[in-house]
Image (cartoon, rainbow, N blue to C red):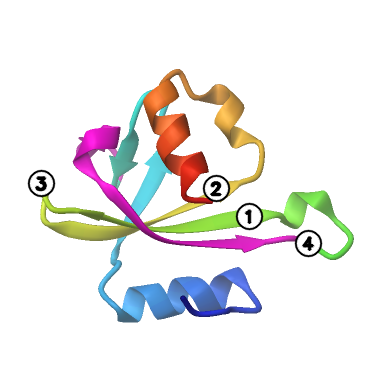
């Protein structure tokens, strides 16, 4: 796995490698490109995870996930701040994302 100094570097590299869709966290799934496709834990794999910690501001802490879905034939990027997992209603989704951290 590669090492990156910034979130921007990680995202740029992943995009060059085909991770072109934007993903967001929903209560029980991941959402691809603004409500087009919902991904439940069995629908995707976490290929890579990059964690970034802010030097002085905890608000600068982020995790970048490279996610692929064979079922839907695409690759995407999920960016999430630390601590946002408390809003998830799906133990399976929480376990899948935290296991890969």
Q: Say which residue appears at 65% left-offset and 79% top-offset.
A: 5
| Mark 2 vs mark 3: in front | 3
Q: Which residue is mark 4?
A: 54
Image x and y of residue 74, in percent: 17, 58
How far apart are the two marked residues, 2 and 1, measured between alpha carbons?
6 Å
Instruction: Say if 84 sits above or below 53 in the image.
Output: above
Q: Which residue is mark 3?
A: 71
Point out the tag, 1 or 4, that comes first from the N-terminus: 4
How far apart are the two marked residues, 4 and 2, measured between alpha carbons?
14 Å
Circles 3 and 4: CB distance less than 8 Å? no
How far apart are the two marked residues, 1 and 4, measured between alpha carbons?
8 Å
How far apart are the two marked residues, 2 and 3, measured between alpha carbons?
23 Å
Q: Which residue is mark 2?
A: 80
Task: Report whether 41 appears left or right of 26.
Answer: left
**Mark 2 neighbour class, 10 Å CA radius: few under 14, some 14 to 19, many 20 or more:** some
Q: Which residue is mark 1?
A: 62
Q: Which residues are magenta?
A: 34-53
Residue reaching furthest to the front: 99
């Amino acid at each position: 796995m590669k090492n990156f100094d910034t979130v921007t570097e990680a995202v740029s590299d992943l995009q060059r490698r085909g991770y072109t869709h934007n993903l967001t966290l929903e209560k029980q799934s991941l959402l691809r490109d603004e409500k087009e496709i919902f991904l439940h834990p069995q629908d995707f794999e976490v290929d890579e995870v990059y964690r970034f910690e802010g030097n002085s501001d905890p608000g600068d802490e982020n995790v970048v996930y490279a996610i692929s879905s064979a079922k839907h034939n695409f690759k995407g990027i999920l960016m999430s701040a630390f601590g946002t997992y408390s809003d998830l209603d799906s133990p399976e989704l929480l376990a899948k994302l935290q296991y890969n951290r």
